Amino acid sequence: MRILLLHPNYHSGGAEIAGNWPPAWAAYIAGALRKAGFGDIRFVDAMTNDLSDEQVRQILSEEKPDVVGATAITPSIYKAERLLQIAKEVCPAALTVLGGIHATFMYQQVLTEAPWIDAIVRGEGEEIFVDLLRTLAGGNWIEARRNVRGIAFREGEKVIATPAAPTVKNLDAIAPDWSVLEWSKYIYIPMGKRVAIPNMARGCPFTCSFCSQWKFWRDYRIRDPKRVVDEIEQLIRDHDVGFFILADEEPTINKKKFVAFCEELIRRDLKILWGINTRVTDILRDEALLPLYRKAGLIHVSLGTEAAAQLKLDRFNKETTVAQNKKAIQLLRDAGIVVEAQFIVGLENETRETLEETYQMARDWKPDLANWAMYTPWPFSDLFRELGDKVEVFDYAKYNFVTPIMKPDAMERSELLDRVMHNYRRFYMNKALFSYPWAGTGERRRYLLGCLKAFLRSGFERKFYDLGRVNYWGPQSKGKVDFGFDASRKRADTSGVEWKTSHNRKISGPRQAEIMACGGGTEQIEDATAAGP
Ligand code: B12
Ligand code: SF4
């Protein structure tokens, strides 16, 4: 059975400005398929190779696959739908399958607007896709598909969702096949080296109302750190990888495992630098361990600092974590780790003053990098439901952290974008002149100058924040900005969507609302709770 995996060609000028990133899902899925005996796999990265629909059509007609599997996050959903439509046109007998977070929750809408999709895999793909392919290979797909757990499909006009499949309980059994990727393409600009995105832990024990990740992965599971280091060693040896970020939402919450991971990296002396996203409170907890983390190669920590403060201010009664944020940033810098503060802006009560406050915070806290993401109301998040009619734009192609989806009551969206750009300009101008060139002589300085290079390049090419596409050329042009929202896209009816969460929460009840974003909260989970299967 010939299987073709497709990553859609979607770009929006956010995190991708740092280079081309390898689509990890393809390696994880390919590894599971190979292990189950489905070895005829080809992966096409239309995003990295900037392939047009016609080029993908050509590849499909040459490859003649029996199964075409595409991925989609929310903003790439229309691109993925279109690619699968092309697949159906070119290979009508092939089974078209869609996976990833968006279709997992929005299968009802997706199957209604893209009836050429034969099946949606809901949740982690490794086990469900194997089950689906075995069922397909067994013949009699139309009758037998009801027995595959964790999928959705159309039956005439009706959309059927089979019962949710369990999460992958034994993460250590997962063996990604990184060889499906064309490694020479995946270069991380700040370091000029190949980059990988291995996955140590899945899930997050928290339930922040604006976030979709805890819902997707459900329970928190973590792999044996030694096996993760084996994988990293293999990535270095076989694919010349020189930098990695962990794909995890929350890699540090299980301190024991994270320390074991770092110790193993030190023991093997792999000389590789890496980065993570994590929470401020874990950094405060691990103050004494930061030198060990640095010794293990950790060079970049991205903190959800003000996701906490802003949302908390707005929604949960002005309890802020400003002092905690500032301290965590200082600790990381003292340990020689590059620290990035993430701000979420653009809720309905955003004003010029609150945007200015975030800039002042960024100056006061002194992170090395700062990032102002536009609040994006994932249609399956709890906050989306709470916002109700305040969400007016349902063009998911623009749900990408760089487009203002919400219109603040006190300003136009174009002004919000302009103010955010103003913050970026001031912040990075200051860093470029007074900070990075004097940030020591070693790795940290080289890394920061590399980030600056990536940043300047995307600004020059007008790719940053999609500025070229929305016609933003500086403050004088803000009246001409056009986000190009497709008004024909309407709110989905998600009332009938079945999604079983088996979230293993330590904290429950009304206090849940108090748990803050990656940046805040004081909660920790016990090692035992987070120990995995
Ligand atoms: C690494 C990363 C990136 C990288 C690399 C992306 C790439 N080339 O794949 C970069 C930096 C480029 C990036 C960019 C963006 N990202 Co990003 N990114 C991530 C991150 C941190 C890890 C993704 C990952 O590799 N996970 C591990 C793999 C194994 O998980 P997975 O992809 O979900 O795949 C599993 C299942 O979904 C399923 N599956 C997936 N596809 C398929 C397909 C088939 C056929 C099957 C059967 C199963 C299946 O099986 C897989 C294995 O279990 C996630 C957060 C996270 N922790 O997941 C955010 C995340 C995916 N990104 C997000 C966003 C919004 C973006 C940007 C729009 C932001 C921006 N403007 O910069 C861009 C879009 C770029 C693009 N075109 O994809 C959001 C998406 C939210 C949503 N609801 O859609 C996330 C979840 C972050 C968040 N906190 O909300 N990102
Ligand atoms: S702590 Fe981070 S990953 Fe976890 S639910 Fe909150 S925002 Fe999402």
Image (cartoon, rainbow, N blue to C red):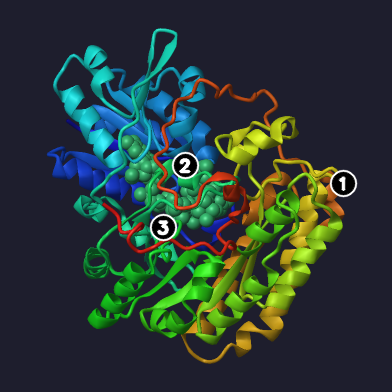
Q: CA distance from mark 1 to mark 3?
A: 36 Å
Work out whether residue 127 can be spotted: yes
Is tag 1's residue or tag 3's residue first in the polypeptide sequence? 3
Based on the displayed image, in which of its 4 quarters is residue 148 positioned?
A: top left
Q: Does ligand 2 reach within 8 Å of label 2's beta carbon?
A: no
Give the crowd class for mark 2: few <14, some 14-19, many >=20 residues within 10 Å: many
Work out whether residue 44 can be spotted: no
Closer-to-camera residue (254/476): 254
Position of 516 with respect to 251 (left or right) is: right
Is tag 3's residue or tag 2's residue first in the polypeptide sequence? 2
Q: CA distance from mark 3 to mark 2?
A: 14 Å
Instruction: Give the number of the disc on residue 6.
Output: none
Instruction: Give the number of the disc on residue 410.
Output: 1
Residue marked by disc 3 = 248
Q: Does ligand 1 reach within 8 Å of label 3's beta carbon?
A: yes
Amino acid found under the numbered disc labelled 3: Asp
What secondary structure is found at the residue carrying circle 2?
Answer: helix
Residue found at x 48% / y 47%: 213
- Image height check: is 253 above or below 14? below
Residue found at x 28% / y 48%: 28
Position in image of residue 460 (x %, y %): 65, 63
Which numbered disc, 2 or 1, marks the residue closer to the eye?
2
Based on the displayed image, in which of its 4 quarters is residue 458 positioned?
A: bottom right
Position in image of residue 429 (x %, y %): 72, 75
Closer-to-camera residue (420/342): 342
What secondary structure is found at the residue carrying circle 1?
Answer: loop
What secondary structure is found at the residue carrying circle 3?
Answer: loop
Instruction: Give the number of the disc on residue 215.
Output: 2
Q: Does ligand 1 reach within 8 Å of label 1's beta carbon?
A: no
